[in-house]
Amino acid sequence: MYLQQFKLKDLPFRLSPDPQFLYLSKNHSRAKAYMESTIWFTDGFVVITGEIGSGKTTLIETFLSELSEDVVVVQINQTQVSAIEFLQSLLVQFGYSPFKMKKAELLATLNQFLVEQHAANRKVLLIVDEAQNLTNRVLEEIRLLSGVETTREKVLRIILAGQPELNEKLDAPDLVQLVQRIRLRFHLTALSADDMNGYIRHRLEVAGSEGREIFAEDTFPEIFRYTGGVPRLINTLCDTALMAAYASNRDQVTLEDIRQAVSELQWLDYAERNNAIDQKRVHLNAELTRPGGPGSDLLHAAVYGRVVLASEGRNLLEIALSHGRKIIGRTPDNDVQIDNRFVSRHHCQIITTPDSCVIEDLNSTNGIFVKGKRVRRFSLNDGDVVTIGKHELMYFDERGHRSRSISDTSPGVPELTGDTGETPRH
């Protein structure tokens, strides 16, 4: 790895939400202050939104790491649940076993718990990440929970965090009562060019750069051009550029390294990529709403491949691959979660374009393997099998208008040979 060459003590551009690497831009500082206000004020919700990769999860983890011991936190990340499942999830984190309770009993138990915590001078904070996936019925349950109160104040503090679609959902006419409870609402934008420069230098400093300019000055405009100031994209590009410089035996990242990294990632510049996505979305919406329009055909055509996740000969999940990336890892904030101790928090990513599909290791502990060999980056072909810890991913290419699904595959996924040298993740 490149740490020794650049004299760093830690990887500076991990995708995992590590609070010590948080860079507080002006917008991130405001969002954090709004979160902190929930501890002192109980008269409404706080809603934080931001694009994918804007730093919401890292901000939440930092906020949580600084809370005092008198705050009881329940954090919900899995939001594609029913109202009953949501209430059960809350009680599980409070130490109950609620799976045989009916709804009335769930609510009574929650109310009793909240009042008891208030009587013991403890504050209860509910944080819901990826809240844009919540159904209106679950949001209504959250609103009702927020009404639990003593004679003086509410006893549950609530932060909803999610992608911009959350704002659209909250503006729906049938959620007017919920919206009236929102005290603060803030959208986390991407970093400015100046903030991005500070962000990169901050992460390098935390990783041990000690003031050394590891990225040449002329690389910063090019990084901003391709990332648009989105922290997750910055991390991906900078890490790939460090690898490029490492391979060329340089101790500073040059403009050539950035361009090589962009080429490897197969990125368009950020503005062009967003315009292309917006135009495709407008075209697709127009076709879907046109009477007799071939909406389903367009949706199918946008799928370039599929992967089947399997373990111990059982198919667990099928994932459609359209243009973009899917991040795979152990924690719920990934696009695909593999809850296994041999899988890193953010283990690998699959990058899909109309012409190719590439799987890329994200500096994981145990790596990814194809045909028994550990690979960092691999262009997938139809039928390839990738080993991730104790799981396998079988790739099916669909660019030739083929239609294959789990039912078309054999019950077991072929095993790969070779020692993977796995180390449990903690």
Image: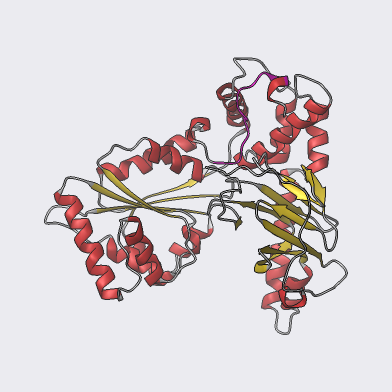
Tally of numbered discs: 0
User: Vertically, is 31 above or below 183?
Assistant: above
Left or right side of 5 for 99: left
Which of 88/197 is in front?
Answer: 88
Instruction: Give residue 92's quadrant in the image.
Output: bottom left
Relative placement, left or right, of 316 versus 159 is: right
Q: Is 392 or 170 nearer to us in this picture?
A: 392
Camera sees residue 275: no
From the top left corner, tell me how far across and down residue 307 is, in percent.
73, 63
> Chief secondary structure of the magenta span?
loop
- Color style of the picture: secondary structure
Residue 200 screen position, x and y as percent: 62, 28
Q: Residue at x 68, y 70 (%)?
A: 285
Query: Which residue reaches farthest bottom?
Result: 292
Residue 312 forms part of the magenta stretch:
no
Quadrant housing residue 207? top right
38 lies left or right of 128: left
The residue lying at 28 percent from left, 60 percent from top is 146
Q: Which residues are magenta?
A: 5-16
**Magenta region includes residue 8:** yes
The image position of residue 31, as x and y in percent, is: 43, 41
Q: Residue at x 61, y 46 (%)?
A: 346
Quarter where residue 105 is shown: bottom left
Q: Is residue 393 above or below residue 342?
A: below
Quadrant including the N terminus: top right
Q: Residue furthest right?
A: 400
Residue 218, placed above or below residue 411: above
Say if residue 399 shows up in the picture: yes
Work out which residue is located at the far top of the displayed protein and give it. Answer: 211
- 39 lies left or right of 79: left
**Rendered location of residue 382, percent (x, y):** 85, 63
